[in-house]
Image (cartoon, grey):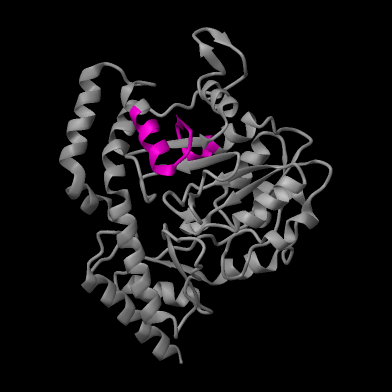
Amino acid sequence: MSIPMVDLKKEFEIYGDAIKQSVLEVLESGSYILGEKGQQFEIELASYLGCHYTAGVANGTDALLLALEALEIGPGDEVITTPFTFFATGEMIARVGAKPVFVDIEPDNYNIDPKKIEAAISKDTKAIIVVHLFGKAADMDAIMRIASEHNLKVIEDACQAIGTEYGTKKTGTIGDIGCFSFFPSKNLGAFGDAGITVTNDKMIYEKLCQLRNHGSKERYLHSYVGVNSRLDEIQAAILLEKIKYLDIFLFKRMGIANTYSRELKDLIKTPAIYNDRSHTFHQYCIEVENRDQLSAFLNEKGISTGIYYPVPLHLQKALSYLNHEKGAFPIAERVAQHILALPINPTMTVSQQEFIISEIKNFVGASN
């Protein structure tokens, strides 16, 4: 038995015919950039998220970059964020010339710890980038309260959290700008790179639309120095079909996660669940002391695993100029050493999950 982390081929069997037809419509249209499919997807996603404006971009990393630029964050500014996330979060802060300022994470939530944010705020702080890691919402009430008190902008890195709810709102729609990735392995994935920015502020939206298109609103007239970062029509056509299955797939992911937690919670550390927010499980991550041994054991059985993320941002060579030493953010460092992601793709069968659970129990039993 071979169980992958993501089984995109099996997913394609579900919606492949509809996607082929939708892509063919694009090919026959002769309109491939900023066309009808892209506009339809932006409208569809705005409705799904419950926000006013969406602007499709080339990928989730560009979404973060354009969000920072739209808020006029640059050299001399500081942006507070988490050290426990994919590199793009900190990378784009550095890319615009600002300084990433890290705040350690909550031990059970893995998201930025609001109780530690205020101590990191300086006269140069302009924004907070909140990451809803693995599909679990961060504590947005506390974060938005701090941002309001200190006149800071909030960017939500919701690249792993489409459909995640915080109270009555969906992640990405609470701060000033939300950023989403549609990388193929995401809970809503394209067939290549794709992303989107979302906001409820019309002026920010209009600026995002220009920044993604060389800073231009009218052809050959440029109000800003922008970039070429547009959601192409083929990816938009694919996403229009796949979004029809999003809530179904999220429901399946949450069901798989519930089974994992029910069967494993007495043996290992399983994801924390909160009553005031949802978890859509882009990844299902456990914590174990002998992580590498368990990963090797499962891989030998044909069970794929993943480590997200083995090196926190403050210890990455590219950000060594920030002069952080090991031990600076102990919770993020500890989690990085013990975290392990298990397969949770929505096409997983009951027998596959039973096999995974059985082998983990076998490993834990043997280890004890």
Q: Where does residue 349 sit, x and y in percent of width and height?
A: 22, 67
Relative image position of residue 78 (x, y in whole percent): 75, 42
Residue stretch in magenta: 40-63
Is residue 138 a member of the stretch shown in magenta?
no
Please say whether residue 193 is visible from this viewpoint. Answer: no
Residue at 72 percent of width and 42 percent of height = 152
Toward the viewer: 216 or 205? 205
Quadrant including the N terminus: bottom left
* Residue 42 within the magenta-colored segment of the rendering: yes
69 displayed left or right of 2 = right
Q: Residue at x 39, y 49 (%)?
A: 186
User: Up-down: is 347 above or below 365?
Assistant: above
Determine if residue 84 is in view.
Answer: yes
Give the residue furthest to the front.
168
The furthest residue to the top: 220
Q: Position of residue 19 (x, y in %)?
A: 21, 37
Residue most extreme to the right: 123
| In the foreground, 7 or 128 | 128
153 or 196: nearer the viewer: 153
Q: Residue at x 53, y 54 (%)?
A: 132
- Left or right: where does residue 29 sit relative to residue 308? left
Q: How many marks?
A: 0
Question: Residue 360's image quarter?
Answer: bottom left
Q: Position of residue 144 (x, y in %)?
A: 66, 50
The vertical placement of 295 against 347, above or below, is below
Q: Residue furthest left?
A: 17
